[in-house]
């Protein structure tokens, strides 16, 4: 029974499981989330890659210490939870990989990155795990901005520009980032398996509307002395967009490779893409934000 | 050199292209590789749709881009060589 209705990544979602997402009135349904059995394997001969089984319209994956998931036809996520206290991890997998595969199956565009809004600019922060996306996003909020999505973002074309849909009002932030930005961790839940991250879900930090994509910034930690930012040419921009596409390796198993590549190339040629180098040591979020905002105001290089 | 060059028939079908300003983004889905061709590279790619010869390519490019023959041939050979290596072009 679908007791819970949400708007997640621009989709109307009906769910049997309560989720920490933006609630909406019952009505349309683009995606449903149900509890149920997940078969051990897909019927067709499906390629197995990493921990997934995948065809162009269905995917089975296992969430470690949480349960098993079946995503099908871009419309349904079936969740088979493991026994035990697995709720937080179930949510992580549903809202991460689950919706990532929904987007792939629907031929829509998921990017692994945090979307933020500040001073009227919509900025997508991308980078490898540990690059500092969530820290810089938290820095944006500390400077008066808002988070549109934390880890996975959905891009779509609209009237000559690109929109990014809101995800859900929750961020995962490192303890040291929270401390540096004066975010109290009292009574915050820790992300399981002791990664040292905490859930921060104060509503006022999040936007619940889609916003225009004005810039993409790839965070590049390295043995640099200072924080520097540089606009990338078309080749560099295309490279950033493709590398950070949600589950890039899986595009080839879906029917939408051509449309996906065309869309990615469009974004890379119309939206400015930047490489932001940050030193490995120290907390440089404020300098990073300053470099980004200066560049976007046109005063930079 | 009369040897014919063209893009491989199989590959052409599985190569995705997208215009990016004057440049051409290209993805070889099967190999999982992507490239960006500048405006001249994009023009050569276009000319390779049907089998042709190095001589004809040089003639066409010289006319279009006003570049000396020696330079044109040299650059073209390097470009075609790289495309052959990547399995995007046969012959040459």
Image (cartoon, coloured by chain):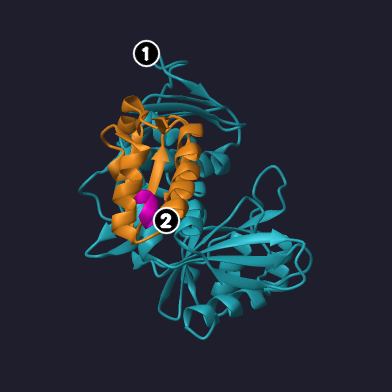
Chain colours: A cyan, B orange
- On the same chain: label 2 and label 1? yes
Let me know if residue A152 is in the magenta part.
Answer: no
Q: CA distance from mark 2 to mark 1?
A: 32 Å
Chain letter of the residue carrying label 2: A
Point out residue A70 in the picture as x, y percentages from the top left corner: 42, 28
Q: Residue at x 69, y 67 (%)?
A: A278
Q: Which residue is mark 1?
A: A43
User: Mark 2 or 1, which is nearer the eye?
Assistant: 1
Q: Could you tell me how many numbered marks the image carries?
A: 2
In the rendered image of this protein, does residue B71 appear above or below residue A88?
below
Q: Is residue B38 magenta?
A: yes
Quarter occupied by the C terminus of chain A: bottom right
**Callout 1 secondary element:** loop
Asked whether residue A250 appears in the rendered view, the answer is yes
Q: Mark 2 vs mark 1: which is more N-terminal?
A: 1
x and y percentages locating residue B45 in the rendered image = 34, 43
| Residue A250 occupies quadrant | top left
Mark 2 Cα shell of 10 Å, populated few (<14), some (14-19), many (≥20):
many
Read off the chain for label 1.
Answer: A
Q: Position of residue A261 (x, y in %)?
A: 36, 45
Judge left or right: residue A244 versus residue B59. right
Q: State the predominant SS element of the stretch in magenta.
A: helix
Using the image, tell me which numbered label, if any, was put on residue B19: none
Which of A152/A299 is in front? A299
Q: Nearer the viewer, residue A200 or A117?
A: A117
Quadrant of the frame with the N terminus of chain A = top left
Q: Residue B16 sits in which quadrant?
A: top left
- The region drawn magenta spans B37-42
Mark 2 — residue?
A167
Apparent side of residue A219 relative to residue A246 in the rendered image (left or right) = right
SS at mark 2? loop
Placement of A84 over or under A10, stated as above or below: above
């Amino acid at each position: 029974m679908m007791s819970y209705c949400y708007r997640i990544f621009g989709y109307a979602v009906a769910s049997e499981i309560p989720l920490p997402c933006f609630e909406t009135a019952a009505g349309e349904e683009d995606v449903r989330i149900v509890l149920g059995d997940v078969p051990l394997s897909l019927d067709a001969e499906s390629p197995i890659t990493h921990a997934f089984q995948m065809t162009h319209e269905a995917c089975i994956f296992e969430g470690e210490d949480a349960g098993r998931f079946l995503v099908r036809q871009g419309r349904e996520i079936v969740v088979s939870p493991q026994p035990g206290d697995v709720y937080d991890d179930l949510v992580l997998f549903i809202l991460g990989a689950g919706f990532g595969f929904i987007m792939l199956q629907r031929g829509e565009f998921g990017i692994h990155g945090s979307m933020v809004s500040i001073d009227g600019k919509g900025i997508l922060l991308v980078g490898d795990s540990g690059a500092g996306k969530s820290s810089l996003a938290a820095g944006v909020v500390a400077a008066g901005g808002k988070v549109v999505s934390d880890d996975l973002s959905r891009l779509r074309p609209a009237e000559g520009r690109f929109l990014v849909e809101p995800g859900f009002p929750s961020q995962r932030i490192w303890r040291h980032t929270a401390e540096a930005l004066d975010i109290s961790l009292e009574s915050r839940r820790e992300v399981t398996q002791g990664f040292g991250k905490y859930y921060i879900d104060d509503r006022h930090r999040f936007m619940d509307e889609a916003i225009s994509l004005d810039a993409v910034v790839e965070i590049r930690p390295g043995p640099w002395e200072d924080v520097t930012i540089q606009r990338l040419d078309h080749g560099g921009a295309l490279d950033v967009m493709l590398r950070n596409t949600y589950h890039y390796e899986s595009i080839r198993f879906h029917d939408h490779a051509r449309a996906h590549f065309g869309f990615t190339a469009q974004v890379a040629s119309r939206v400015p893409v930047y490489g932001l180098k940050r030193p490995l040591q120290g907390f440089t979020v404020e300098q990073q934000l300053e470099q980004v905002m200066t560049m976007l105001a046109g005063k930079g290089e | 050199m009369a040897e014919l060059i063209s893009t491989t028939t199989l590959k052409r079908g599985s190569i995705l292209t997208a215009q990016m300003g004057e440049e051409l983004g290209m993805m070889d889905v099967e190999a999982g590789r992507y490239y960006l061709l500048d405006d001249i590279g994009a023009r050569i790619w276009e000319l390779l749709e049907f089998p042709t010869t190095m001589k004809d390519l040089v003639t066409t490019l010289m006319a279009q881009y006003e570049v000396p023959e020696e330079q044109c041939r040299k650059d073209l050979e390097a470009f075609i060589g790289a495309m052959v290596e990547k399995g995007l072009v046969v012959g040459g």
